[in-house]
Image (spheres, rainbow, N blue to C red):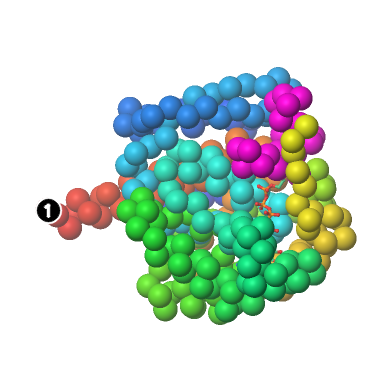
Amino acid sequence: MASYLNSSMVLSKPKQPASHLDFLNSQHLSSWSPITSVRWRTHHQRCSVQVKVRASSSMGKGLKVMISGAPASGKGTQCELITTKYDLVHIAAGDLLRAEIAAGSQSGKQAKEYMEKGQLVPDEIVVTMVKNRLSQPDSAEKGWLLDGYPRSSSQATALQAYGFKPDIFILLEVPQEILVDRVVGRRLDPVTGRIYHMTYSPPETEEIAARLTQRFDDTEEKVKLRLQTHNQNVESVLSLFEDITVKVDGSLSKEDVFATIDSALSNLIKQKNATLGMAAA
Ligand code: AP5
């Protein structure tokens, strides 16, 4: 297990349901700017709450994060929260592929055939797409948050060969029976890009509810195929990142999941700063 992680972070469920304001207690609060609003409905309270999250301009600077997990384990949801706080460039392999499909490109057409079957899109499409996005100046400057990549050892090796090495590999662990329910209820807001769930994270207004869309691969039948693919590949990827892996219980509320990730990232930043300080001394 990564050394910057306290064992309590991954092994135990918080005794109290974490407050939606927990992460505002961060020691980094004073250096945040500007303010971004995030609104969600917690599992513990059925009322909608709005919190002010200050996006950091520098605290996560240069951080290189990979987040992995089964379909609907909450990668995208956590990425929204992580980027809001740490201001990393969010690169989601699935989103890059869907953008190609929407653009009607040849790669998009090919990719859709695999996505329809819940299979991995071939490396020659995915690796180049991800590498090109990682190579853009904003990723190098701000740091990156890679979501849903690598999904095979060949993808991991390809990235390393291009010189992209993560500081931390976050794995969201969620029991299979919960995943199907999450997939089927998921909806996306095409205007804001936000992820909703009709039960766990319902839209805040009628206007938003009316415009929500569903992904073409979000059916019970397709998610089972996607899960099979994930289960076949996850171990080979994990074995390559063992020393920097942080396993997080993704079945908790999204606020509690984020609290664990937030602690791991804060500790990692502290550790990196300490190492830099020692090198400068
Ligand atoms: P991709 O788009 O990456 O899909 P996925 O991996 O199946 O993951 P999802 O996006 O479905 O889920 P998520 O973990 O982001 O969950 P979310 O936060 O939305 O990939 C799609 C396809 O593209 C693949 O099948 C493959 O074909 C291809 N592809 C992608 N990457 C590839 C690669 N590297 N190589 C080759 N092919 C690739 O949450 C889900 C729902 O649950 C939401 O409704 C949310 O509101 C809810 N929720 C989230 N967290 C919680 C919580 N803690 N409690 C309750 N509800 C929650």
Q: Residue furthest front?
A: 104
Magenta stretch in the rendered image: 186-209
The front one of 234 and 186 is: 186
Q: Is residue 72 left or right of residue 218?
A: left
145 shown above or below 128: above
Q: Is residue 205 left or right of residue 164?
A: right
Place of residue 232 in the rendered image (x, y in percent of width and height, measured from the top left): 72, 73
Q: Is mark 1 within 8 Å of ligand 1?
A: no
7 shown above or below 252: below
Q: Quadrant of residue 107?
A: bottom right
Number of callouts: 1
Residue beneath the point at 60% across and 38% down: 192
Q: Is residue 75 visible?
A: yes
Q: Residue furthest right?
A: 221
Place of residue 143 in the rendered image (x, y in percent of width and height, measured from the top left): 38, 54
Amino acid found under the numbered disc labelled 1: Ala
200 shown above or below 249: above
**Residue picked out by circle 1:** 281
Q: Is residue 58 left or right of residue 77?
A: left
Place of residue 53 in the rendered image (x, y in percent of width and height, measured from the top left): 47, 29
Q: Assess whether residue 198 is covered by the magenta stretch.
A: yes
Place of residue 180 in the rendered image (x, y in percent of width and height, measured from the top left): 81, 52
21 shown above or below 99: above
Ligand 1 image-quadrant field? bottom right
Q: Is residue 149 left or right of residue 135?
A: right
Q: Assess whether residue 92 is covered by the magenta stretch.
A: no
Q: Secondary structure at mark 1?
A: loop
Residue beneath the point at 39% across and 56% down: 139
Q: Quadrant of residue 105?
A: bottom right
Q: Residue furthest left?
A: 281
The front one of 34 and 21 is: 34
Residue beneath the point at 50% across and 43% down: 82
